[in-house]
Image (cartoon, rainbow, N blue to C red):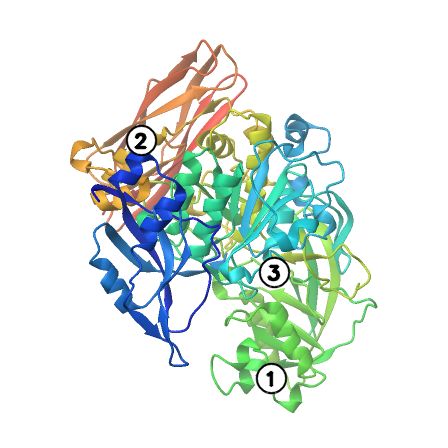
Amino acid sequence: MGFFKILLVFIFCSFPWLTIQSGLETYIVHVESPESLISTQSSLTDLDSYYLSFLPKTTTAISSSGNEEAATMIYSYHNVMKGFAARLTAEQVKEMEKKHGFVSAQKQRVLSLDTTHTPSFLGLQQNLGVWKDSNYGKGVIIGVIDTGILPDHPSFSDVGMPPPPAKWKGVCESNFMNKCNNKLIGARSYQLGNGSPIDGNGHGTHTAGTAAGAFVKGANVYGNANGTAVGVAPLAHIAVYKVCSSDGGCSDSDILAAMDSAIDDGVDVLSISLGGSPNSFYDDPIAFGAYSATARGILVSCSAGNRGPLLASVGNAAPWILTVGASTLDRKIKATVKLGNGEEFEGESAYRPQISNSTFFTLFDAAKNASEEFETPYCRPGSLTDPAIRGKMIICLAGGGVLSVDKGQAVKDAGGVGMIIINRPYYGVTKSADAHVLPALDVSDADGTKILAYMNSTSNPVATITFQGTIIGDKNAPMVAAFSSRGPSRASPGILKPDIIGPGVNILAAWPTSVDDNKNTKSTFNIISGTSMSCPHLSGVAALLKSSHPDWSPAVIKSAIMTTADTLNLANSPILDERLIPAYIFAVGAGHVNPSRANDPGLVYDTPFEDYVPYFCGLNYTNREVGKMLQRQVNCLKVKSIPEAQLNYPSFSIFRLGSTPQTYTRTVTNVGDATSSYKVEVASPKGVVVEVKPTELNFSQLNQKLTYQVTFSKTTNNSNFVIVGGFLKWTSNRHSVRSPIAIVLDK
């Protein structure tokens, strides 16, 4: 059999090749494609036989029971890559490496999981604006790759929903068929899903409800954030792909299989609120899976990660992905701790007692009784064994790998009557409003330090917690959340990431179980935080834009979102971060999403898919690495490569600008008024001169394209790397099209 030197990888997610065997590990295997199969366009069965031929026939693993176990195929991929996932030993991989057509094998990674008021905060109003123009996302299908879904939740009622579009080819698995309806039109489960799309974690139900949940009156947690819960695109359809276990682990072989299915099924938007460490795109399954999806016209929205405020921590940073950071709402769920000396400190909590109680209780610092530094201060379950805890209010430190609600349960189990959680120092003013099991609140590290100082100043430290509930009107909103991962992108620093920020702090949405004392309601909700929550907000916005503009490509939708974003908070000041200072451009990206403006952007930056080949070659990828992305042979010596910043992207990221000026071009497409004139406004970053030619763009028809040139020149000397930001903006009599500029000045 002859072979092309073509790099491909193949996954076919419908095969039940799923026997998990001890002594074996899951590998994702890339292979070349045989010439005969490509030229004759043979069936998938022939391709499957070809991929099965790579599995070693003689080498076996020894199980814990002493039995020999053969290598086992799990998934065969046909959209997202060319190759397969299989259970193999290291020895079996070595044997496979000898076979003609083998390219690479890598062990699968297990990735982590990274609303009543948010529609109003985003400017979405019934029968007005973008909700009216898009018919609430009608006809659009959002695929949610997550922990599954609780189908009986009222957020997934199909009252008033039309049937799925004719293009829909997805399924509800046999054990789930009677759970699907015109809202929830698809449900699949993969290896870690344990055979059922039912959500055993809550994360997937929450993200699906945020993106496209139906209108549900009376949604609240302990009476807080009370109102009508609704997703961003309430008439969009939902298809669920369960790839995560109940403990939140998600394997990338499952994620690839889910993306493979979603492409065939016919989704319009993929919402992926999970991710691992930033990797090169050719080694990142979400990146190359998303590349294939985007090539088919599917917009892929991903969480930026929860590793902030560390610089260069952003994940899911490929330029074809909409990378979403997290910001606050103008809503707080306020609680206050009052000390015995009269001092008061504001925190947040979703707990609310049925009967108000202002009794003072003795404070107990869990850290003072810590036998191990990383044990008791974090109030781990089972660690609070001191009898003195009983009847006291316990001070715990945030973090330590323990959820705040679990800390409260540990305190309650130990006999404590209340809890104060002191946040991490680098979290600044970012606080969580969790649905605690006892009176508790989250305070900043600065306030926590004062509380501890009070404890050390008296022999009888006491405190009480009062709960004020929902407060609307925080003028500092939107503010970048401390945990929201920051750029620059390690994989491609010449592309500004994250792209956008959206609501991700203390978000109320659907939940599988009741988290408060109201056990009689079927409408269960929870309040949680993370870029996992901001991602589905943007997935919903993308669905609205797709419904309003069916001909828009993923790149155009992304451009519309980015160039119309808000850069000022409700106080009309620059968006702040957790330190209450103006946020770095690598924290805020283009700004905070404004759905109404995104629906009418004026000009857009469309990224031609053919430009990614010179982009990949410009990243100095090898031919094999580029081939893994493109699923075909590439010779970069025959490609005129481009620098990252030359990609026709809606933002600019100039990494290590030195004494030599750098010049790039951009092409914009007119989707506003047929006859229109735009003039440029430039806010040059400090120490940089930005020159734009021409300074005016005159359009005479719709969809007309015009190109401009931008030159960046450094005008200052600096001894260290310096991050500076600015923007350029094209303005007509009706539209304003803003592109952020991020520059790292070389030393």
Which quadrant holds residue 619?
top left
Q: Which mark is residue 432?
A: 3
What kind of residue is marked 2? Asp
Q: Residues within 10 Å of mark 3 (few under 14, many from 20)?
A: many
**Residue on which the image places disc 1:** 384
Q: Residue 55: image x %, image y %?
A: 31, 59
Question: Would residue 304 be found to the left or right of residue 97 on screen?
Answer: right
Residue at the far left: name it.
637
Residue drawn at point x = 44 percent, y = 34 percent: 296
Q: Earlier in the sequence, mark 3 or mark 1?
A: 1
**Residue on which the image places disc 2:** 611
Q: Residue 321: image x %, image y %?
A: 43, 41
Q: Residue 155: image x %, image y %?
A: 71, 48
Distance of label 3 from label 2 (alpha carbons):
42 Å
Q: Relative to residue 524, is residue 342 depicted above or below?
A: below
- The reply to whether discs 3 and 2 touch (Cβ–Cβ < 8 Å) is no
Who is closer to the viewer here, 674 or 360? 674
Which quadrant holds residue 253?
bottom left
Question: Would residue 325 be found to the left or right of residue 92 on screen?
Answer: right
What kind of residue is marked 1? Leu
**Labels 3, 2: front one:** 2
Question: Would residue 745 be found to the left or right of residue 248 on screen?
Answer: left
What kind of residue is marked 3? Ser
- The reply to whether discs 3 and 1 touch (Cβ–Cβ < 8 Å) is no
